[in-house]
Amino acid sequence: MIDRTHSLPVVRQCQLLGLARSTVYYQPTPVSDRGLALMRRIDELHLQYPFAGARMLRDVLRREGYSVGRRHVATLMRRMESTAIARPPRTSQRHPAHRIHPYLLRGLAIARPNHVWAADITYIPMRRGFVYLFAVLDWASRRVLAWRLSNTLTTDFCLDAVREAITHYGCPEIFNTDQGCQFTSLEFTGLLKDHGIQISMDGRGCWRDNVFVERLWRSLKYEEVYLHAYETVRHAQQGLERYVQFYNQVRPHRALDGRTPDRVYWENRPAQPSAA
């Protein structure tokens, strides 16, 4: 909207458009090396102590030699979309256009593939910078059905992964997520409704409602991400693709009696109705 070559000065253009001059002159800066190191360590601590908030993490980091304050820790946690396991005060009203759906899995016996799918987003550190990972998981078999990387927390890369999973594996009866804005958006819920999928959402602060995806994140980060310092997004893509294949096809799962997610999924998947 602002034309720096126009005869009107930028100040006057801002006045006419009702914009603050700071939004025009601001130049985004990359996260510093120190900030990236802090984000990686905070992510590791969050997996170990998911109940720890900014104050506790600040104290742990200071004991490890980091000079950091609570507000800076809280800022980095918001950037990574990390929150402590605690019921927050109900100080904000939900957007009327973003309906929150009830949690449908409590007490539900889930023993067959494509009964329930779950999804979530996590932060993936790299040597320089970071990306976000979205994955769709089959609840009964723990199989990763689709995933996408993105350098922004938009909804489109989540929609792409869900569409891929539906195209290759059909539709689940129930799709469970947390209450993140990507999942409450009209685009995301509309996609599920268009395919006749019931929508389930975790309670606020109830990470156990989506515990299998949280367990996937822990395995993926300790067995792959933290062992490699990805140089680029392409390297991260290759590393995660290698690990997801290992996780689905090779890695035995204790909850599956030592079987792999692939084996459990394909041996127990309900027959798909044939086209007329």
Image: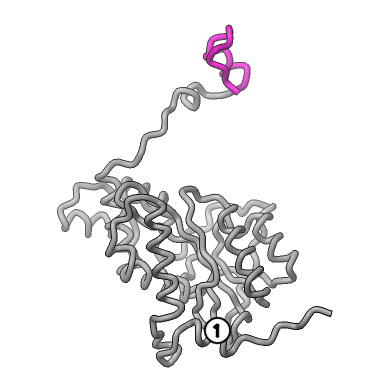
* Residue at position x 58%, y 62% in the image: 161
Query: Does the magenta run of residues contain 29?
Result: no
Q: Nearer the viewer, residue 171 or 85?
A: 171
> In the image, 173: left or right of 30?
right
Residue 184 screen position, x and y as percent: 62, 58
| Residue picked out by circle 1 | 265
The part of the image, by quadrant, that contains residue 175 is bottom right
Within-10-Å neighbours for mark 1: few <14, some 14–19, many 20+: many
Residue shown at 29% from the left, 41% from the top: 32
Residue 60 as seen in the image, left or right of residue 199: left
Q: Secondary structure at mark 1?
A: helix
Residue 109 visible? The answer is: no
Q: Residue at x 37, y 34 (%)?
A: 29
Left or right of 239? Residue 182 is: right
User: Which scheme is used to colour this image of the protein?
Assistant: one colour
Which stretch is magenta?
A: 1-18
Residue 90: image location, x then y, percent: 53, 58
80 or 150: nearer the viewer: 150
**Residue at image x 43%, y 58%?**
237
Relative placement, left or right, of 233 versus 180 is left
Q: Identify the amino acid type marked 1.
A: Tyr
Q: Quadrant of residue 258?
A: bottom left
- Give residue 234's position: percent from left, percent from top: 41, 53
Towards the viewer: 261 or 219:
261
